[in-house]
Each structure stands twice: as structure tokens, then as C-alpha cells.
């Protein structure tokens, strides 16, 4: 059966009588994390060879043997298949026709929507098909908050918004950055915006923010250097587009406030989260170079960039570099007006 997003956490905590959990989608980090949660719900010690068997996609011939093996230590067994594909469909279907309390967890990143394995898991009442796609917006912020709550750590709203805007579309990378924050704050701690900036000051996201501020301020050389650094540090092109879009929207809100009679300083102070004090000069420079209409046009172009980067086989790195260059050129043209 297909599991909706609201039920995923409950299913992973309490698999119940489920015999198969299929985890598919584009976020391999989220797939692995959810697989681990489901496995530990059945076998708390994942290093126990009597209760946990980990197989790769080429081990389909061992699947039946592992599913019906006896647990010498008692309790349900887990068969955890990594990088699964359609070759598992036939042996899984055959195993479901025979009684067993073993839970089979299949990681299947990139599995096609019409794959036979996915069709089987969605059709069977004792199977769960769970989609694992990159989180964004409020869903991403909720996940970050939950990860920190595991250590009884609270984070200020402006810090959470800023931090979420830096992250790429991979759950493993997100958790790694959250773990840095948790170590910095300590159990029961509180994270402010300044804390978060200080903690991840060397992260790829800061290079990405450098690129956005430099491009909109008309600093072509600085923008080129920063985007190359961000891409080299593993920032995804989609994350580039989303960060740029967030920055352009903030600029536009401030520009509209200025057009309504506010001073530049007041317009910047009115943003939430506020402009970081080390960025105020670049942000103010950008406000003097862009009109609200041009910022809207740039935002629409950036949305198209994200869509283009999502196309299979698209030259996404080249598209990002070109887009950054265009933003810087537009800003420089504003100086000449």
C-alpha cells in the first residue's frame, strides 16, 4: 500500500504486521535514514547477525533464504536490501505467498514510477511503499526542529529560516549540518541566528550566500569565485536556485518598502530574518541597483533555472554559472542608469 506523508513516521516507528517496506525516491540520504528507523523498530541492535541481514541488489538469490531463516536469539528478523531494483520483484512476490514474520526493508533510490517492484509494494496490503523526496520549506524546517529536539535543543525562528535556506536536497548532508549545531549548542541549548552563522561559517551554504550577495551587488568577480567554491563544496544546482530565489524575494520586499517611502535602513531592518550585519553593505548596494520590477523578472528567471536543473541530463552546473553571471551583469547595468 502507498503510505501518505502524514503516516510515514508512525509506520517507521511501528511496522506492525508489515512484511515489506519499500523506500524509493530521489533523496538517498532520507531513504537510508528511514530504513534505519524501520530496522531498529524491529531489531534495536543492528549489529546482531541473528536478527539482521544486510544484502545488496545482486543478492536476490539469497533473499528467500534470509527471509525464512530462524532467529536463533528470538524476536523478528530484518532483511535489509540496499540499492534494490526490479530484480527483487519475483522473489519478494513468492515470499509473500508463504507465512513469515520477517520484515524486508528495500532501499530503492531512483526507482521508476512504473517499476514492477513499486507496483507490487503499492498493491499488497502487507507492504508499504514510501516515497522519499527532498524536503523544502516548512517540511524541511520541521525536520530540522525535530532533529534538534532529540537533544532538547531549541532554535530561534530567524535562525531556523536562515539555516534551512542554505541546505541542499540531501537528507544525509542536512543531518550532518544539524549534528554540527547540536554539538555546538549542547544538550538543552538554545541556538540564535549568530550562533548558527558562527557554527557553520565554513559550510558550502555560506559560499552560496556569498555568491547571491555578490551577484546582486554587481560584483562579477566575487560572484564567480563564490559560486565555484559553493559548487566545489557539494552545493547542488537546485540549492543554488532556491537560495538565489529567497535572496531576490527579500531584496524585492525591501525595495517595495523603499518605493513606499521607507528609508533604505528601515526597509532592511523590517526584514525577517534581519540582514546579517556583515551583509548590510552588499544588501544596501543591491537595493540601489535594482528596481522592484527587475527583481521580479530576475526571480522568474531563477524559477526557470530550477526547473531546467531538474531536467534529466541538463548541464546544471553550466546553467548555474551562466545565471550568476547574468545577475551580476544586470546589477552592473543598474550602476550605469
Image (cartoon, rainbow, N blue to C red):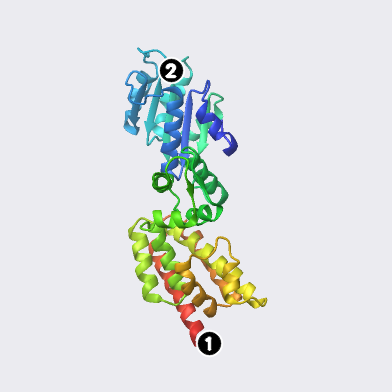
x then y, percent, for residue 337: 53, 87
- Disc 2 to disc 1: CB gap under 8 Å: no
Please rate how many residues cluster around mark 1, counting C-alpha atoms within 10 Å: few if below 14, some from 14 to 19, many from 20: few
Examine the rendering and report whether any part of residue 66 can be seen.
Answer: yes
Up the image or down, 194 lies above or below 90; here it is below
Q: Secondary structure at mark 1?
A: loop
Q: Secondary structure at mark 2?
A: loop
Q: Quadrant location of the N terminus?
A: top right
x then y, percent, for residue 221: 36, 75
Q: Is residue 281 left or right of residue 87?
A: right
Which residue is more in the foreground, 105 or 146?
A: 146
Which residue is more in the foreground, 267 or 132?
A: 267
x then y, percent, for residue 193: 49, 56
Residue under numbered circle 1: 337
Q: Is residue 80 left or right of residue 119?
A: left
Most extreme residue toward the right is 260
x then y, percent, for residue 17: 53, 20
Up the image or down, 109 lies above or below 72; here it is below
Q: Is residue 161 left or right of residue 83?
A: right
Residue under numbered circle 2: 76
Up the image or down, 19 lies above or below 122; here it is above
Q: CA distance from mark 2 to mark 1?
A: 72 Å
Which residue is more in the foreground, 66 or 78?
A: 78
Please rate how many residues cluster around mark 2, counting C-alpha atoms within 10 Å: few if below 14, some from 14 to 19, many from 20: some
Mark earlier in primary sequence (2, 1): 2
Q: Quadrant of residue 4?
A: top right
Which residue is located at x 52 percent, y 79 percent?
A: 289
Which residue is located at x 54 percent, y 63 percent?
A: 274
Check residue 199 in the rendering and tell me which mark sits there, or answer none: none
Which residue is located at x 43 percent, y 37 percent?
A: 33
Examine the rendering and report whether any part of residue 300 can be seen.
Answer: no
Amino acid at each position: 500500500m502507498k503510505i501518505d506523508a502524514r503516516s510515514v513516521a508512525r509506520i517507521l516507528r511501528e511496522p506492525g504486521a508489515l512484511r515489506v517496506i519499500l523506500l524509493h525516491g530521489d533523496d538517498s540520504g532520507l531513504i537510508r535514514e528511514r530504513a534505519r528507523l524501520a530496522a531498529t523498530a524491529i531489531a534495536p541492535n543492528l549489529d546482531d547477525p541473528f536478527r539482521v541481514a544486510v544484502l545488496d541488489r545482486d543478492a536476490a538469490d539469497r533473499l528467500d533464504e534470509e527471509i525464512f531463516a530462524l532467529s536463533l536469539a528470538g524476536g523478528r528478523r530484518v532483511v535489509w536490501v540496499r540499492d534494490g531494483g526490479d530484480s527483487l520483484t519475483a522473489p519478494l512476490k513468492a515470499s509473500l505467498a508463504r507465512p513469515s514474520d520477517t520484515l524486508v526493508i528495500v532501499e530503492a533510490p531512483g526507482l521508476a514510477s512504473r517499476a514492477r517492484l513499486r507496483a507490487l509494494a503499492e498493491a499488497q496490503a502487507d507492504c508499504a511503499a514510501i516515497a522519499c523526496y527532498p524536503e523544502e520549506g516548512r517540511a524541511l524546517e520541521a525536520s530540522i526542529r525535530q532533529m534538534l529536539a532529540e537533544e532538547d535543543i531549541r532554535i530561534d525562528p530567524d535562525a531556523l529560516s536562515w539555516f534551512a535556506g542554505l541546505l541542499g536536497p540531501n537528507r544525509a548532508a542536512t543531518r550532518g549540518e544539524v549534528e554540527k549545531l547540536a554539538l555546538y549548542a549542547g544538550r538543552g541549548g538554545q541556538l540564535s541566528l549568530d550562533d548558527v552563522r558562527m557554527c557553520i561559517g565554513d559550510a558550502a551554504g555560506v559560499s552560496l550566500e556569498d555568491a547571491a550577495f555578490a551577484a546582486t551587488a554587481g560584483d562579477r568577480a566575487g560572484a564567480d569565485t563564490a559560486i565555484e567554491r559553493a559548487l566545489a563544496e557539494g552545493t547542488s544546482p537546485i540549492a543554488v536556485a532556491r537560495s538565489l530565489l529567497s535572496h531576490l524575494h527579500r531584496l524585492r520586499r525591501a525595495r517595495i518598502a523603499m518605493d513606499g517611502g521607507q528609508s533604505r535602513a528601515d526597509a532592511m531592518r523590517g526584514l525577517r530574518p534581519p540582514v546579517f550585519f556583515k551583509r548590510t553593505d552588499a544588501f544596501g548596494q543591491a537595493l540601489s541597483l535594482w528596481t522592484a520590477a527587475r527583481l521580479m523578472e530576475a526571480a522568474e528567471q531563477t524559477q526557470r533555472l530550477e526547473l531546467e536543473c531538474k531536467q534529466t541530463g541538463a548541464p546544471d552546473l553550466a546553467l548555474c554559472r551562466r545565471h550568476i553571471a547574468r545577475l551580476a551583469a544586470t546589477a552592473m547595468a543598474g550602476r550605469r542608469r
